[in-house]
Amino acid sequence: MRWRPIADWVGFQLVWLICALGAAQGRNAPGVIAAGLFITVLLAMKGWSLPECFTILGSGAVGLVVESALTTTDLVRFAAPWPSSQLAPAWIVALWLAFGATLSATAALIGNHLIVKASIIGFVAGPLAYWTGERLTALEIVGPAPLTYLTMGLIWAVTFPSLLSLRQRISS
């Protein structure tokens, strides 16, 4: 069904917005709850597939490392910095977990030449998401903006196709 990947993508965008708006109000719970519900619904629809679960956990782990690195290098400062101002906050890790739940749908939407397209999409969409998050006051770009956005673009140009490759490996 062609509508499923689009529905997953729309659902993720809603989770993203709830995470960002909750963080802007200094709260982790709205985003964590929204991501948890989203992941639960997607996993239930997929029969609680073990490869899907591992993909989601892998995405969360990558997100924890990437976002914590952005924080400790003082490129980004997140609103609602819980459990520590030196680690990625719970809401952003929950967002990465929810993102992991969409990787199957994303692969279906991207189609052929998955890695190349994912690199390009990551390079553009990654920084755009941070830019939007900053406008919503969910985060603050602390480092020099051009350098920070270029860094984010490069991180996402590598991370997004890597997560899709992880998903393919786990699923096979």
Image (spheres, grey):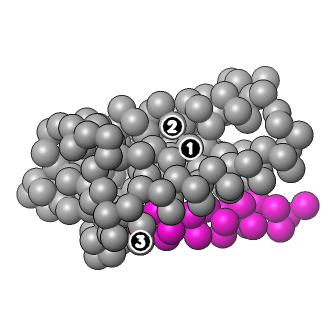
> Is residue 52 positioned above or below 128 on the image?
above
Question: Could you tell me which secondary element the residue under label 1 belongs to?
Answer: helix
**Which quadrant of the rendered structure holds the C terminus?**
top right
- Residue 21 location (% of width, % of height): 41, 71
Determine the CA span between mark 1 and mark 2: 5 Å
Q: Name the residue: 52% across, 53% down.
A: 32
Sequence order check, earlier mark of 3 and 2: 3
**Left or right of residue 170: residue 60:** left
Judging from the image, what secondary structure is the residue with disc 2 in? helix
Q: Locate residue 24, reporting x and y percent.
A: 33, 69
Name the chief secondary structure element in magenta: helix
Residue that badge 2 annotates: 60
Which residue, given by chain and number where applicable, does mark 1 sit on?
97
Q: Amino acid at mark 2?
A: Gly
- The relative height of residue 38 versus residue 158 in the rendered view (above or below) is below
Mark 2 and mark 1 in contact (Cβ < 8 Å)?
A: yes
